Amino acid sequence: MTVESTSRDTSRSSTTTQESTARPPAGDATDRARAPRKSTPAKSATAKSAKSTAKSAPTKSATGKGTPARKPTAKKPTAGTKPARKAPAGQTPAGQAPAPAPGAPRETLAGQAPAPEMVQLLTPEGERVEHPDYPLTISHEELRGLYRDMVLSRRFDAEATALQRQGELGLWPSMLGQEAAQIGSGRALRPADYVFPTYREHGVAWCRGVDPIKLLGMFRGVNHGGWDPNSNNFHLYTIVIGSQVLHAAGYAMGVAKDGADAAVMAYFGDGASSQGDVAEAFTFAAVYNAPVVFFCQNNQWAISEPTERQTRVPLYQRAAGYGFPGLRVDGNDVLAVLATTRAAAELVRSGQGPTLIEAFTYRMGAHTTSDDPTRYRRQEELESWEARDPILRLRRHLDREGAADEAFHAELEAESDALARRVREAIRTMPDPDPMAMFEHVYADGHTLVDEERAQFAGYLASFADHEGN
Ligand SMILES: Cc1ncc(C[n+]2csc(CCOP(=O)(O)OP(=O)(O)O)c2C)c(N)n1
Ligand SMILES: [Mg+2]
């Protein structure tokens, strides 16, 4: 496999950063310490050689034409040329890795691709840095607004997790750690844009103005969605992995036909990137020049599967194969996510075709409340990401800038407590649906099988009444 960069600007300044912490990002060099597991991919000894090879720098198209122009340098692998790097053990002379025996350890990406660069505007220490392609002028008031969004959506999320533990919800998928990716991208959108979320986009829902209470109904099992998608241009949560990406591509094709001035946002995860639906969506969006931003939150885990089980190249590089731009942004940097998503949305609205953003972030909590991540990932890994907490990062920036005083923080805490109270009260007073309602809206004109099931279920419910002597 020849790894090819989507880069079209090799004069990247130092403000496009390498992942600056102890270990390289997942999906790239995989010398991360994993909890012991069966058939764990062999730790590569070639991480160093990977670092010494060409760096890729994704940007939006300089020409603004949807097709990525490649600008190879002496250091970069050119199209059709095998990258100058040490062949991983087990590779054939032709550079093709033989298929490993089932269950056998296989060479990881460490020997395959350079560590990718990603757009960053805020360092983990909260220091502002500039990027030539993504200038961002932002007022103190706007910074406070982003901080407020992140704090309140985290509080809502924590409250929902607690409510599941108290038996009020059947399940909850926490977005802990992904606040910057969600608030940054959500706040980059306009009201006329349309969002297709997964099941974890509580922060994006917040930005779209969906009442957080409405997000809880499906997880309590009292409805199949809970809000009108057209009220906020925010589609219902989708549990079937990757399917909403295909819906987004189709919707965007419709937007293009209507000549509407809107962007469509397709949220999906690193795990979803392996789904056929996502591949099909990329193909259709590309060839129909559909105005869709594919926004992949690479939180590095698909339940217990790490990203290196999904891909042998950094995910944003997939865009090149479909003929549209792709970039990686620091998903824990709300300013970089805001700036890159704004630029991507603008690009797609102007008819240049789709764009892929990979927001590199981390799922700090469990996959859902049914999951126990201590079974498959190490505490050290979590701690290294807690140090890069997206809210802490913006807080450090606010402090450096003197952009928020104590009164602001005290008021925000009070607002946060009030939100939590409102959520608790609302869930306890949320009405149960009529059990017979589940037979409605199955077929427009009815169906004999549904009629039969309805009658059976009515009999079943009646049997309780008999039992209770009513
Ligand atoms: C088509 C389909 N296959 C499998 C599942 C089970 N499943 C639920 S979540 C999940 C992992 C998704 O990971 P990712 O796309 O990275 O999103 P994340 O949960 O990390 O946000 C899987 C496999 C599903 N819901 N739908
Ligand atoms: Mg994931």
Image (cartoon, helix red, strand yellow):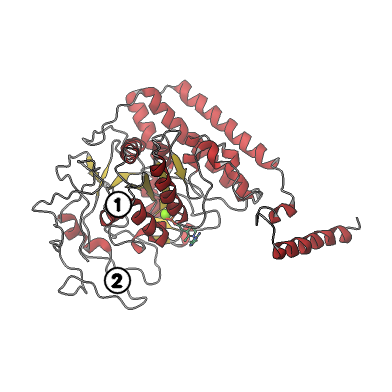
Residue at mark 2: C-beta within 8 A of ligand 1? no
Q: Residue at x 21, y 35 (%)?
A: 132
Relative to 361, does residue 469 appear above or below in the rendering? below
Dot 1 or dot 2, earlier in sequence: 2
Work out whether residue 446 can be spotted.
Answer: yes
User: Label 1: few (<14), some or many (≥20) within 10 Å?
Assistant: many
User: Label 2: few (<14), some or many (≥20) within 10 Å?
Assistant: many
- Which residue lies most toward the bottom here? 101
Q: Residue at x 45, y 43 (%)?
A: 195
Residue sitting nearer the eye, 292 or 97: 292
Work out whether residue 273 can be spotted.
Answer: no
Relative to 12, does residue 407 appear above or below in the rendering? above
Percent position of residue 417, x then y: 57, 32
Position of the C terminus by quadrant: bottom right
Q: Secondary structure at mark 1?
A: helix
Percent position of residue 377, x then y: 41, 59
Q: Give, as a three-letter code, the residue at label 1.
A: Tyr
Q: CA distance from mark 1 to mark 2?
A: 22 Å
Relative to 330, does residue 276 appear above or below in the rendering? below
The label nearer to you, 1 versus 2, is 1
Quadrant in the picture for residue 280? bottom left
Q: Residue at x 15, y 56 (%)?
A: 53
Position of the N terminus by quadrant: bottom left
Give the residue pinned by disc 1: 316
Residue sitting nearer the eye, 327 or 60: 60
How many numbered dots are placed on residues in this image?
2
The label shown at residue 106 is 2
Quadrant in the picture for residue 391? top left
Q: Give, as a three-letter code, the residue at label 2.
A: Arg
Percent position of residue 7, x then y: 20, 49
Q: Secondary structure at mark 2?
A: loop
